Image (cartoon, coloured by chain):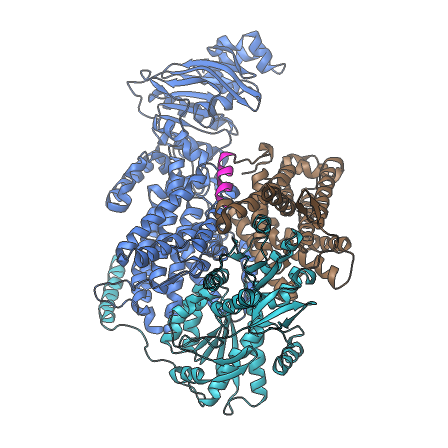
Amino acid sequence: MQVFLQTLVGGLSFGAVYALVAMGFSIVYRTMGLVNFAHGQVVMVGAYAASTFYMSSRLPFILAIIVAMLVTGAIALVMERVLRPLENKDFDLMLIGTIGFGVVLESLATIIWGATGHAVPTPVAAEPLDVFGVRIRTYSLVVLGIAAVATVLLLLFLQRTKRGAAMQAVAMDHEAATAVGIHVGRSNAIAFAVGAGLAALAGGLVGPLLYVSPTLGGTLGIKGFAAAILGGFGNITGAIVGGLAIGLLDSFAAGQFQGYSDLVVFLVFTAIVMVKPTGLFGERTVSRA
Amino acid sequence: MNLLLRNRLRSAQLIAVAVVAVTAWFLPYGLDGYGIHVVNIAIVFALLAVGLGLAMGVAGQINLAQVAFFGVGSYALAIFTTSSGLGFWVSAVLAMLATALAGLFVGIPALRVQSHYLGIVTLGLALAFTNWVTNAEVAGGASGLNGIPVPPLFGIDLSDEYLYYYLELIVFGLAIAFAVFLVRTALGRRLRAMRDDSLAAGAVGAPVPLLRMTAFLTASVYGGAAGVLYAGLIRYIAPETFSVANMFLLLAMVIIGGRQSILGCVIGAVALSLVREALVDFSVYAQLGYGSVVVLMVVFAPTGLAGLPRRIHGVIRRRRSGDRAVLKPFRPYPPAESAGQGPPLEIAGISKNFRGVKALKGVSLSVAPGEIRGIVGPNGSGKTTLFNVISGIYTASAGTATFGTEVLTGRRPYQLSQLGLARTFQNLRLFGQMTVEENLLVALDRSAMRSLWRYVLWPVGIWRFERRLRHDAAELLERFGLEDYQAAAPKSLPYGIQRRVELARAMASGPKLLLLDEPAAGLNGQEVGQLKEIVRSIRDSGVTVVLIEHNMGLVMSLCDRITVLASGGVIAEGTPAEVAVRPEVIEAYLGDSFSTAEVVRAVETETMS
Amino acid sequence: MTRFGIGRVLACATAVLTIGACSAPGSSQSAPADTSGPIKIAVVDAQSGQLSSLGAWESKGAKLAVDQWNAKGGINGRKIQVDVFDDTGDPTVGTNLARKIASEGYVAMIGTAESAVTVAMAPVLQQAKIPSITSGQSPSITAVKSPFQFLNGPTSTTYDETLAKHLVDQKGLKSIAFITNNGSYGKGEHDAFGKALAGRGVTPVDDQVVTTDQKDFSAALTSIRQKNPQVLFVGTEEVEAGLIVKQARELGITAVVAGAAPMGTTVYLNTAGAPNAEGTIVSSPYLSNEINDASRAFAQAYKAAYNEEAELHGAKAFDGTNIFLTALKTSNAATGQQLADAIRGTKYPGLLGTFTFDETGVGIHATAIGVITAGKLVAAAS
């Protein structure tokens, strides 16, 4: 029982990070129909930027993350401009084009920060909480809290602001949105920047949990993308659920199957996708396949 | 003139192939030990790339498990030779079989999901494979398997990489020849049709699920062959060889080279292998360069290196567009004596719900053999939904459709096509990256998938079949007046001609029942007249025709009977004259824009002429 | 006309082919030994991808050694040239590189840090008679049995025998839980330490295997916590070890942490966090930069050259390169078999200890026990 609860807690705290990564995938996809496989690398750049500002410039942790979000947002605008010809194009080109961008980001990070990477000290010094023998990392609570706030803010932005509504409209129907005078290009750029901001948030938060190196993005990207698919690609709430689900799946598979956990995770994932291809929260209206 | 040009082109191709073959044969004489090894590795990657190109570029199936197929091939060989102690070639055959099985397994998800879903699923399965070999005792775990024997071959010492090159070259040559043969003949055409438009491919009789499996099977067999050659060359394998990074490299090879062309895949693989080799001591900057090249290629040359000549050619041709092609008149079918004796179409109580929305509510109608039936109704009345149900694209929520003794509902589109049903689509669904002739050839090909054994055992049979198909296609092109557009890309043609190509494609399958979804949409008056003539001739040749149309003049004059749909139900049925005066029809369909008198007058003038 | 053209081409081709087929291609002569230019040494490691940090450290250590020798005038008046190649952690690229350095006249190779790549390269290097010294310690490397393959560190057996001796024999700790990864390093540690314990009649109370890129260890660690072991043996590379120990402490595991060389690095220390890493028992041939004059000098030079702290992998490559260069000097810049023999005959007092190579190519046969005390690895009082 204790193992079960502890695994649950562990899975949720990484699940929150996957959820943030998945949200980034989804917001870009639903708005512009682009699957950004460089998203994991953007997360990595975000992690580097946040940890560098936090450690060298001695900025407060939250401030460092916000600065990192601005940095990745700027990178995203460049990326969006370069990849614009691929938007809503066939998937093969998007796939390899964004992977290429990922390789560029990874090698740039190696050139700037070196190959060896660095550890990031935990910004929350408090002792872990002990709830009936289950230990909960205080920093994990911070991560969960920030992820929840980010989700609420994002949903509010999409539903309550004019800009957000315009992005929703673009997501629903490109042509109709253009017809009613929505600047699709600007919506796309904002979606990309918001996605990159979420990536930096995920990267900044994951830094103290893991170790920041140029290859950080690889697995985070793949698992985050799987989370987005699992939740229903393009659906923001789905991304949250999918992220937590992947986190839990990961942790329980690791406990149960040890070294074979990846095998189990991906087989289960494949089975779920085959049974329910639109994901747990799939919306037909957004599917562009 | 055209023929002469084609002959000259073909001989130029042959000469090019001969030159490449001779160069390849003498290549080792100019290479040192390092060079030949690099070439040997590049050939293995080229083989993998061709397999990936067949799945992705030709069949349109995203396959990020190619590197796992590679792994299954080499691991199976290693395990059979080292643990089971089998001979190299026996193990090679078993390894190929194991890879084929893996291919079929990875292909299963393609039956349910496509595009990025398929991408992440296949990638996940590839990662699962790497995870398995890293752990499994039988696969040597993380440290891999050593001691794979040198393949024995009539006393030739294949541990010499120069001699191994010739083994690879022969296998590779055969693999390329087979791939080219595949792409240019019936199976390849079906695969490409599926890539361009899987819905339309199913509707003309291509068995889409089987084709998807075939795509993965082919990719895996190429992967398996590459794996066997790799294991025989390096004689040591470890999980790291089959990493995601190598999968992406492979993907870059295929996309940069040009995924739709076998030659392109080979060029991409060889080029990237050599470039990577040349940059091996610049590490980080090499990665930066590799990434940038990939991005630039994708953005500026989406068709890859192989597509460049055609793009350049296209620009030049557009400049001197002395287009003298003309649409010739339709040559009517000889009237069949059996016209009107076929089976009737019976639709009984068909309903279709979409998440609570009732698009069809118990539609029943029967169409007599040899009839032209018009289906009219306002937008959203469920006309196209009805067609989609009949042609197997949607499954009915309730009710049945039968054609004579055959039950149509519950079958897949390709099965219905084989039963003699053909259809066109409201917004044209031609195979965009194939020529007009190929569009027709796909539909003319009625062969069952089980005849595919001939690809492996009796290619001559395929060639003969191919010649027959081309002959039929030529006749069909001529009948529909499309000879001049034989080699044209459908998208480059005027709308009216595209409509006619789609009609010709529907007729190519030799249907007994033809469903036309707004065949006159976008046609001018003269073209509508031609259409009327064509449809009548089709009916006279013994085909039952059901058409959805908004052009009331056409419906009134062409159709024998008309069924009126509104809000998912039948509100009226009868001859044009009967239907036109029914008040509920006028209310539901015509609204205020027409008066009854006008419609009656239109009917009278049409029928008199 | 066209038909005639094709026929002619085909006829020519067949004629040429039949002639060509008579003589097999291939240049069996190796590159002539160049005795005037610089002596070329190759560093082959992953400079990109997952393992690039190891590659970066190793190439820095090797370059530092070469720079020092060149500053002293090289060998027999010849400069030493060191070139770094990126194997991307891929065995296939490794075999390409093995052929490349064989055909371009490199006399020796430093690397690789990835055992799979090393094993893949070994047969080619053996054939070309190029000695190489790897920092890997997997049993699969010594299993190749190449006389040209050397190891610049101890094997897992040495590390773990020393550790077991310290823990079980000296401290009497017998309740030990394992957490190792499924990579070649972790598997090697798992087996070697397991064997060392079995020899002492001790069986681990828990045996958890994790993957190399796992992030959450809750399940494995909670299971271990329930067994309440005295010692937590960690058999993973430095970053993962740091994460495991950090999470273990957060879960309230108070057991003594023990492991091999990776646990003695600053990467481990920083990833785990100094308070969590406190008290970690490490079996390593290179306890710290402060252990003696040689290591202090090395650390100083390293810091001056790269503006970062020296660590184990750099030290290993530094030692390996020095051994090569010493052997080159004693053998008068010999190559091939002679050079390999010279290396085998070299007794070199290095940062990791005194190297004496046995027939398996292993040069270091002892490790020391250190304990992380106040954020620094210091030799344990024995």
Picture quadrant where residue B444 is located: top left
Closer to the camera in the image, C184 or C29: C184
Look at chain A in the picture and name its colour.
brown
Residue nearest the observer in this picture, A54 or C234: C234
With respect to residue C257, does C221 lie above or below? Answer: above
Residue B108's x, y, as percent?
A: 42, 39
> Which residue lies at the image location 70% right of the left edge and 34% below the top edge?
A180
- Placement of B161 over or under B181, stated as above or below: below
Location of residue B57 in the rendering, given as x and y in whole percent from the top left corner = 44, 48
- From the top left corner, tell me how far across and down residue C218 is, in percent: 60, 49
Q: What quarter of the picture does the C terminus of chain B occupy?
A: top left
Task: Name the one closer to the observer, A95 or A42.
Answer: A42
How many callouts does the rendering have?
A: 0
Colour of the chain lettered B = blue
The kind of secondary structure the magenta stretch mainly shows is: helix
Left or right: B339 in relation to B519: left
Magenta span: A266-276
Q: Give the left or right position of residue C363, taking residue B157 as reference.
A: right
Q: Is residue A274 magenta?
A: yes
Q: Is residue A34 above or below residue B430?
A: below
**Can residue A142 be seen at all in this image of the molecule?**
yes
For the point 36% across and 47% down, the residue is B218
Was residue A14 drawn as part of the magenta stretch in this picture? Answer: no
* Residue C215 x, y percent position in the rendering: 59, 52
Chain identifier for the cyan-coloured part of the image = C
For this rendering, which residue is in front, B270 or C318?
Answer: C318
Q: Is residue C210 visible?
A: no
Specify whether A24 is left or right of B550.
Answer: right
Q: Name the residue furthest bottom.
A: C77
